[in-house]
Amino acid sequence: MEKFIIGNWKMNGTQSLIKTMVESLHKTIEQNSPNAQVVICPPFPYLGLLQKTIEGTAVKAGAQNVYYELSGAYTGEISVNMLTEWGSTYCIIGHSERRSYFGETDELVQKKAVVLLENNITPVICVGETLDQRESGAHEATVVGQLTKALDGISASDLARCIIAYEPVWAIGTGKTASDEQANDMHKVARGKLAELTDESTAKNIPILYGGSVNAKNAASLLSQSDIDGSLVGGASLKPDDFCTIVTSAP
Ligand code: PGA
């Protein structure tokens, strides 16, 4: 299966980084034909520029958030129609930073997933346990619980159009990556839940990405694990050379 390498810029970047990054990625993809779909998710104000800049390249655009209503009096929010107009074909939802700083719940994540699927934007649904949850042995139950709630009421055929990102909170931006084995084990747990919600062969084809301190050095071994279908990259997705190395690390 083709891997997904998704860059989550968070609240970082500039217009000039959009241009430099797309140029570097385009060159890398042309020269190496990596086995990866590359997506950049910059802050909202850069999506229009990104849409123009990726024209004629294999790079795709994604957003970091969306609201589930289509329009109306929701100051500060962005609708799925706006993402479509901006040429975004992916959207991250339920990132742990949105959950912890902005009160995003599994129920809200579910509503966002539904509206994205209805509008043909691929939801990148993030799940992951905190350090406390891992140390108390609750990591598997936490992730299964998040998936159960976020995917509630979503049909198997719609689920087949989703991407899941497993991002242990203790590994995000900390430089502490989950080991290959820890990550792969959790991906198997998540895939088991997806198989329950769909069936084995559908679940096999739902990409499960790993995120949390992925960098140019550790990407290749993470990406070669049996159940890791790509990575959601934060910090390293702001550095063109590092991000390009991650893209070409996809086996
Ligand atoms: P990081 O972030 O790569 O900087 O750890 C990953 C993410 O939060 O998506």
Image: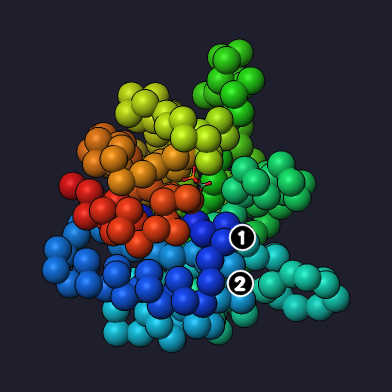
Residue furthest to the top in view is 136
Would you place residue 217 above or below residue 189 in this image? below
Residue 218 in the figure: left or right of residue 249: right
Residue corresponding to mark 2: 44
> Viewer-nearest of labels 2 and 1?
1
Is residue 107 visible in the rendered image? The answer is: no
Circle 2: element type: helix
Would you place residue 205 above or below residue 87 in this image? above
Residue corresponding to mark 1: 11
Measured from the top left, where is residue 81 in percent x and y? Answer: 62, 79
Compare residues 215 and 103 and report the one nearer the observer: 215
> Looking at the image, which residue is at 75% across and 50% down?
102
Measured from the top left, where is residue 179 in percent x and y? Answer: 37, 26
Whether the residue carrying mark 1 lies under 8 Å from ligand 1 is answered with no
> Looking at the image, which residue is at 29% across and 40% down?
217
> Looking at the image, which residue is at 53% across and 41% down?
173
Count of numbered marks? 2
Report the coloring of the rendering. rainbow
Would you place residue 183 above or below residue 209 in this image? above
**Which quadrant of the figure has residue 145?**
top right
Circle 1: element type: loop
Q: What residue type is labelled 1?
A: Met
Is residue 173 visible in the rendered image? The answer is: yes
Residue furthest to the right in view is 73
> Looking at the image, which residue is at 38% across and 73% down?
20
For label 2, count other residues whose C-alpha is less than 10 Å away and answer few (under 14), some (14-19) or many (20+). some
Compare residues 74 and 149 and report the one nearer the observer: 74
Would you place residue 124 above or below residue 204 in this image? below
Q: Which amino acid does label 2 sit on?
A: Phe
Measured from the top left, where is residue 48 in percent x and y? Answer: 53, 83
Measured from the top left, where is residue 156 in percent x and y? Answer: 46, 51
